[in-house]
Amino acid sequence: MTPKEIALTLAKIADAKKAEDIRVMEVADLTVLADYFVICTGTSAVHLRTLAEEMEQTLKKQGVFPHHIEGQRSGNWLLMDYAGVVAHLFLRDTRSFYALERLWGDAATVVFPED
């Protein structure tokens, strides 16, 4: 899978699992960290874990494995690193505090189709 396909797959999973305010940002021209960021908001720590588990399991079935997952103990922000794609799963207050969309404001937003 290409980084864009991974990012769109993560966004679709987030949408199917009722994540809020889902954003896919193309950051390849702005940083060497990743080609895409997927940012979404969960409603609780349990919801964040459910989102992360579904994302990880779905991509594993397609042969795509995370290089690193961070924040599983904090409960307010999970980061899933798929090399070319980094997924940020936040609780609302934490997302507002870090304001990644503002920090990476020059990034192009990728529209993902909603089923």
Image: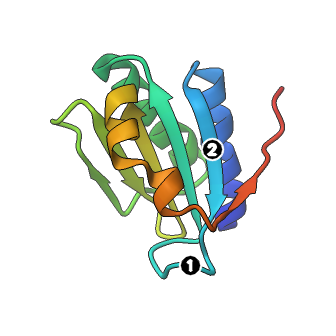
- Residue 37, compared with residue 95, is above or below; it is below
- Quarter of the image containing the C terminus? top right
Category of crowding for the residue at label 1, using alpha-carbon neighbours closer than 10 angstroms: few (below 14), some (14–19), many (at least 20):
few
Residue 60 position within the rendered picture, expressed as x and y whole percent measured from the top left: 51, 47
Nearer to the camera, 14 or 77: 77
Horizontal placement of 58 versus 115: left or right?
Answer: left
Residue 18 position within the rendered picture, expressed as x and y whole percent measured from the top left: 58, 18
Name the residue located 54 percent from the left edge and 69 percent from the top edge. Answer: 84
The residue singled out by tag 1 in the image is 30
Residue 80 seen: yes
Residue 1 seen: no
Nearer to the camera, 89 or 81: 89
Category of crowding for the residue at label 2, using alpha-carbon neighbours closer than 10 angstroms: few (below 14), some (14–19), many (at least 20):
many
Secondary structure under tag 2 reads strand
Horizontal placement of 32 versus 11: left or right?
Answer: left
Q: CA distance from mark 2 to mark 1?
A: 17 Å
The residue singled out by tag 2 in the image is 23
**Residue kind at label 1, given as amino acid type:** Leu
Mark linked to residue 6? none
**Residue kind at label 2, given as amino acid type:** Arg
Please identify the quarter of the rendering in which residue 13 is found: top right
- Residue 48, compared with residue 89, is above or below; it is above
Name the residue located 68 percent from the left edge and 35 percent from the top edge. Answer: 12
